[in-house]
Image (tube, rainbow, N blue to C red):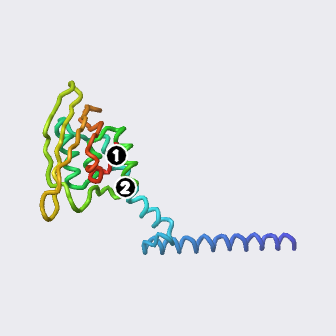
Amino acid sequence: MKITVIKSKKRLVATFIGLFVLIAVVINGIGYVLDLKYVSVFAAARQIDKYQVRSELLMDAMEDVGVCCAEDAANVWASGLKKRSAALQYSVMTTELKKVYAKQLDSVFPNWVTGVSSPWVDSYKITKTEKVNENTYIFNILFSTKTSTGPAGDYSAILTVIKEDGFWRVTKIDADKQLYAYTGYKP
């Protein structure tokens, strides 16, 4: 009789565990099908990973792509100011500068849309190019800003561009303080 009671209790526990697992799987499945991240572990993982993984892959890819001309690095960076794109600015920075820049962006422009709606960067021009050596150039860039009523001011930036891993990359940025709002970066 003792053996029968013990077997019955074990069966009852096993039945409850099986029922619990079945209910959890069904609820998780329903949550997955309906894409309810607070109901389904799988739906939550799918939604979180989708953007996190994509972001990490894009950031990693930036180490393996670049420009093959020093002036192009200055132009891509300056274009990033005009287009309000931290991604363009970031794409032509050295590995070390990328780390500093990304950290600053997290606090001032977490969505990586830099600049302000008005005045905006209307145009830019490289005003001076200095070849320091085979692997280093310095570019002076003049940015013109504008509002809906007309010109709003000109500001300068000096970029030091070096060759890193076969690409030309911005290693140093010295800019007028007024450009900080457009770059998302304070040296």
Q: Where is residue 139 in the image (x, y as percent from the top left)?
A: 19, 36
Tag in front: 2 or 1: 1
Position of 11 compared to 57: left or right? Answer: right
Q: Position of residue 84 (x, y in %)?
A: 24, 55
Taking depth in this image into account, of 11 and 112 the one nearest to the observer is: 112
Give SS at disc 2.
helix
Q: Which residue is drawn at 15% across and 55% down?
A: 122
Q: How crowded is mark 1: few (under 14 residues within 10 Å), some or many (20 or more)?
A: some
Q: Which of marks 2 and 1 is nearer the N terminus?
A: 2
Q: Image quadrant for the N terminus? A: bottom right
Q: Position of residue 114 (x, y in %)?
A: 28, 55
Q: Which residue is drawn at 30% across and 36% down?
A: 171
Query: Can the viewer see residue 182 in this picture?
Result: yes
Give the label on residue 186, or none.
1
Give SS at disc 1.
loop
Query: Can the viewer see residue 167 in this picture?
Result: no
Q: Is residue 17 above or below residue 169?
A: below
Q: Distance between the residues labelled 2 and 1?
A: 11 Å
Taking depth in this image into account, of 35 and 127 the one nearest to the observer is: 127
Q: Mark 2 points at which residue?
A: 108
Q: Which residue is drawn at 63% across and 72% down?
A: 20
Work out which residue is located at the far top of the displayed protein and give it. Answer: 133
Position of 171 compared to 144: left or right? Answer: right
Q: Which residue is drawn at 26% across and 59% down?
A: 116
Taking depth in this image into account, of 174 and 100 the one nearest to the observer is: 174
Q: Position of residue 175 (x, y in %)?
A: 26, 43
Q: Residue 92 occupies which quadrant of the picture?
A: top left
Q: How many marks?
A: 2
What's the amino acid at mark 1? Lys
What's the amino acid at mark 2? Val
Q: Residue 132 occupies which quadrant of the picture?
A: top left
